[in-house]
Image (tube, rainbow, N blue to C red):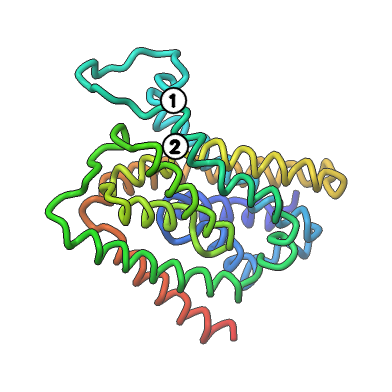
């Protein structure tokens, strides 16, 4: 791998790690950065380049596993809860219920999404519509004295399913998985932190599945020479995601979603004048 390719892998991993858990669309940012600047398709085939943008998200997902490791161990019955006073705990079955809608649609439309939606123009559309949803969610939540569901452990199966349905919007690149699910959770009465926690926990199995599916379907296009590019991007995404997760979870209940929505709209305006 040449030095310039090494640098590009680090940059794409950094963009992924810093944006995966903020409601601004990590996939959208990677597509924009790559299309407008890095041009990874010049040294990777189209299918390998698109798969890379999915697979390095595994680095970010591994960061979630590290941050939420105690909760995952509790959900799988491998560790007793550190807080025995809690009457309810988030169950693995609730996470699965939330995953089903996007999982089914992701499998059915994966080819179409890869072929037609990985472009700067489609990302811009997703960024704007997602921003509108986030503004609406914050406006609705501001009308209530306090959230109905303060903690992720209080989520009901109905809320999990409805959040999962709203998560389907994130199959459109640029819409943002965390943006859609946090907005959906807030609209359903969750606190911003509870919605964020549930979003991150759901992201682990769905992103593992999406990455594995993309790798299997495009395995024939890979060569051994592509492997270092993937490894460097993975490590970069993992490191920067660890930083961003801690920062985001501390801030989300304070700043909520509107600042991220404004950023998305400003970003689209800037891209329009530069790219078009």
Residue located at (37% from left, 70% from top): 263
Q: CA distance from mark 1 to mark 2?
A: 8 Å
**Residue 125, position as x, y percentages in the image:** 53, 74
Q: Are marks 1 and 2 in contact (CB under 8 Å)?
A: yes
Q: Look at 30% across and 42% down and name the residue there.
A: 194
Q: Is residue 221 above or below residue 274?
A: above
Marked residue nearer the N-terminal end (1 or 2): 1
Above-or-below relation of 207 to 66: below
Residue 182, compared with residue 194, is above or below; it is below
Mark linked to residue 201: 2
Secondary element at image label 2: helix
Is disc 1 placed on a helix, strand or loop?
A: helix
Q: Position of residue 211 (x, y in %)?
A: 66, 43
Relative to residue 134, is residue 62 drawn left or right?
right
Q: Quadrant of the C terminus?
A: bottom right
Question: What residue occupies the far front of the structure in this picture?
Answer: 158
The residue beneath circle 1 is 72
Indicate the position of residue 184 as horizontal and vertical percent values.
Answer: 38, 55
Q: Residue at x 39, y 42 (%)?
A: 158
């Amino acid at each position: 791998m040449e030095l310039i390719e090494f640098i590009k892998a680090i940059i794409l991993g950094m963009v992924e790690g810093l944006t995966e858990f903020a409601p601004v669309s990590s996939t959208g940012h990677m597509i924009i950065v790559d299309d407008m600047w890095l041009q990874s398709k010049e040294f990777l085939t189209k299918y390998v380049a698109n798969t890379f943008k999915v697979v390095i998200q595994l680095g970010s997902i591994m960061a979630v596993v590290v941050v939420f490791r105690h909760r995952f161990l509790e959900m799988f019955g491998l560790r007793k809860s550190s807080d025995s006073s809690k009457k309810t705990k988030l169950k693995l079955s609730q996470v699965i219920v939330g995953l089903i809608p996007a999982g089914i649609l992701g499998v059915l439309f994966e080819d179409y999404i890869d072929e037609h939606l990985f472009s700067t123009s489609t990302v811009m559309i997703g960024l704007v519509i997602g921003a509108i949803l986030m503004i609406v969610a914050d406006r609705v939540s501001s009308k209530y004295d306090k959230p109905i569901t303060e903690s992720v452990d209080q989520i009901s199966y109905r809320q999990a399913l409805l959040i999962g349905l709203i998560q389907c919007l994130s199959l459109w690149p640029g819409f943002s998985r965390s943006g859609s699910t946090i907005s959906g959770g807030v609209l359903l009465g969750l606190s911003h932190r509870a919605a964020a926690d549930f979003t991150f926990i759901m992201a682990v199995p769905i992103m593992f599945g999406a990455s594995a599916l993309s790798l299997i379907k495009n395995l024939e296009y890979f060569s051994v020479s592509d492997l270092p590019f993937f490894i460097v991007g993975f490590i970069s995404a993992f490191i920067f995601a660890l930083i961003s997760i801690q920062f985001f979870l501390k801030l989300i209940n304070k700043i909520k979603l509107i600042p991220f929505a404004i950023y998305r709209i400003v970003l689209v305006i800037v891209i329009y004048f530069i790219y078009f």
